[in-house]
Image (spheres, rainbow, N blue to C red):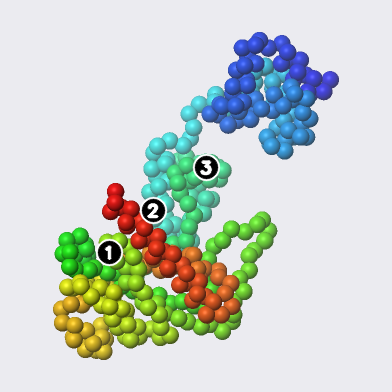
Amino acid sequence: MSVAKDVLRVWQGLSTRERRLLRCFANGSPDAGLRCHCKIVLSLVRGIKPAAICRGLGSESQVYRVAARFVAEGPAGLADRRQDNGAGKVNDHFVERLLAVLAGSPRDYGYRRPTWTQELLVRVLDAETGIRVSITTMSRLLKRCGVRRGRPKPIVACPWKKARRTRRLNEIRRLVTRRRRDELVLYVDEVDIHLNPKIGPDYMLPGVQRTVLTPGKNQKRYLAGALHARNGQLTWVESDRKNSDLFLKLVERLLQDHPRVRRIYLILDNYKIHDSQRVRLALAKYGDRVQRVFLPPYCPDDNRIERVWKDLHDNVTRNHCCETMHELMREVRVYLRRRHRRMRHEYARRRAA
């Protein structure tokens, strides 16, 4: 007698209540294993062959195994037998130690390797807690804890003392939140646009690596931008060179766009073109109308315009396929103009609300 006939025979011997319960488990059980087992049984009852069932519900051997347990034990044989194994190895203490270990480096535990692997985590947690789990369990646990495998961010430590750095950042935050109506606060920075595309991650089909055609000989253009601290709108200028003239060109553009503003505060990093002798002499004619406020060294996260440049790279220059700088800059302008319109509409909607 075939497997399907054996399953159908047992199914016909079940009560109406048992059949209804199996259908409910197949459609809405929180236990994925039980849900899969019930679907296999119902498929066999409908006359579907095991080879066809395994395409969506596991391997063919699993179909036969579930059918054999159903024939031998009835509906009770569909439950996961691991429920009787007792409490699992992984407890709250194990999870806490895992997160503490991940906060450090393998070098902290006597290994020369600088990055973590699942095998190494299993080994270290075994020594730390006396509990050894499988690689599969470790993989599931990392996913459950929201741990991801990503690219680290390189940073440079600020040479200032912590108190001085905190004091300066607090001054800038107060400047942004407590400015007068006739004052303007802007985050200022420059960005390089390379004709050679920035290579970044992208989705690819299995077994296929995406290629990015590069022009070979690189070309550069530079943008200087000023991000409005209140409404997020961006003002920018372009140049072939990244020098003091680029920064002064941006200042003149800001003065033209905001003729009624009594004072403009520019939050800057410590790049040399922001404090050169040429810049000092050029800004002197404006008196105190243009004020430069310098961030502590190596604090890019505190300059909000850096996020705008990141979005620009992600949406335009990352893996781009433009053949000429003219074509690339056209895409850059289109993106920035669209962003400008979007931020203007969002700010108007917030004010209306």
Taking the view exactly as shown, the residue that stands out farthest to the right is 1
The kind of secondary structure element at disc 2 is: loop
- Spatial separation of the CA atoms under disc 1 and disc 3: 43 Å
Is 211 on the left or on the right of 222, as rendered?
right
Mark nearer the viewer, 1 or 2: 1
Please report the residue visible at 29 percent of the width from the left and 69 percent of the height from the top. 187
Helix, strand or loop status at disc 3: helix
Labelled pair 1, 2 in contact (Cβ < 8 Å): no
Residue 119 vs 54, above or below: the answer is below
The picture places residue 278, in percent across and down from the top left corner, at 26, 89
Q: Quadrant of residue 223?
A: bottom left
The amino acid type of the residue labelled 3 equals: Arg
Residue 103 coordinates in the image, percent (x, y)? 38, 53
Q: Answer whether residue 327 is visible to the viewer in this image.
A: yes
Which type of secondary structure does the marked residue at label 1 adopt?
Answer: loop
Three-letter amino acid code at the position of disc 1 = Ala
Tell me the CA gap for discs 3 and 2.
19 Å
Residue at which label 1 appears: 229
- Is 286 displayed left or right of 59 in the figure? left
Q: Residue at x 44, y 64 (%)?
A: 338
Say which residue label 3 marks: 140
- Judged by depth in the image, the label closer to the viewer, 3 or 2, is 3
For the N terminus, give its image quadrant. Answer: top right
The residues tagged by marks 1 and 2 sit, at their Cα atoms, a distance apart of 34 Å
Give the labeled residue for mark 2. Answer: 103
Nearer the N terminus, badge 3 or badge 2?
2
- Precedes in sequence: disc 1 or disc 2: 2
- State the image coordinates of residue 315 (x, y, percent, origin top left): 49, 65
